[in-house]
Amino acid sequence: MTPLTHWQHLAICAALTERSFPNYALYCEIEGINSLPLRKMLNKVWEYLRGQLKSLKNIEKQLENLTDQIPDPDTKDHFGVLPAMDTALALQSCLQAIIDHSIEDSDAITEVMGERLAEVIRLQADDENVELESDELWQRHQGFVSELLTLINSKTSHADLVKKLIPFSSDHGVSHLGICLEE
């Protein structure tokens, strides 16, 4: 397999962040805080990937603002803080990768999202040894990652690929954990 370019790594990170965004939105709803600042930051990442971001100056400011938006699991006593933190940290990685092209965290973010999903499946089954491969959410996530890699490796222009990635990654508002805020 051909090594991924920096743009492809960033696109994977953005897609995984987009897919996990409902987790952050639910956390914000529970905590009574606004998820819009993170949504706007993620939109800036998509703008960058489309080649539409005019200046990177704002990205450093966004990165500073994001620090205050990252949920702290030491100060909250519900499980939702962990998937929300994962989403915020994935977005942080995206913003850092825009500034520093040596950052290619797609493998790490993919792993974190998979590990959190495995944790949720084990908690729901109340069985540490549950067979992940037979779980519907696990299968959906694995299918998503596989299709994402197929899309990323397609011979499509960046702008056209982003047009496909955003709706694909938002998955009708359902996160990789099966969380959906829309009714």
Image: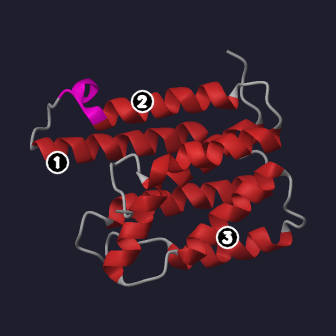
Farthest bottom residue in view:
32
Sequence-wise, the earlier of marks 1 and 2 is: 1
Q: Residue at x 34, y 67 (%)?
A: 81
Residue at 66% x, 76% y: name it: 64
Amino acid type at circle 1 is: Leu
Q: Is residue 100 visible?
A: no
Q: Which mark is residue 63?
A: 3
Q: Is residue 134 left or right of residue 176?
A: left
Predominant SS along the magenta part:
helix
Does residue 123 appear to the left or right of 11 in the view shown? left
- What percent of the width, then of the height, locates residue 123? 16, 48
Tell me the crowding category of disc 3: few under 14, some 14 to 19, or many 20 or more residues within 10 angstroms, Cα based.
some
Task: Report how far apart the C-alphas of labels 2 and 3 lie in the structure.
Answer: 30 Å
For the residue pair 83 and 166, the one nearer the viewer reads as 166
Above or below, 165 relative to 47: above
The answer for how far apart the CA atoms under marks 1 and 2 are is 19 Å
Q: Please tell me whether mark 3 or mark 1 is closer to you in this view.
A: 1
Q: What residue sits right under mark 1 in the picture?
A: 123
| Magenta residue span | 131-136
Give above or below for 75 relative to 93.
Answer: below
Q: Which mark is residue 142?
A: 2
Please report the residue visible at 73 percent of the width from the left and 76 percent of the height from the top.
Answer: 61
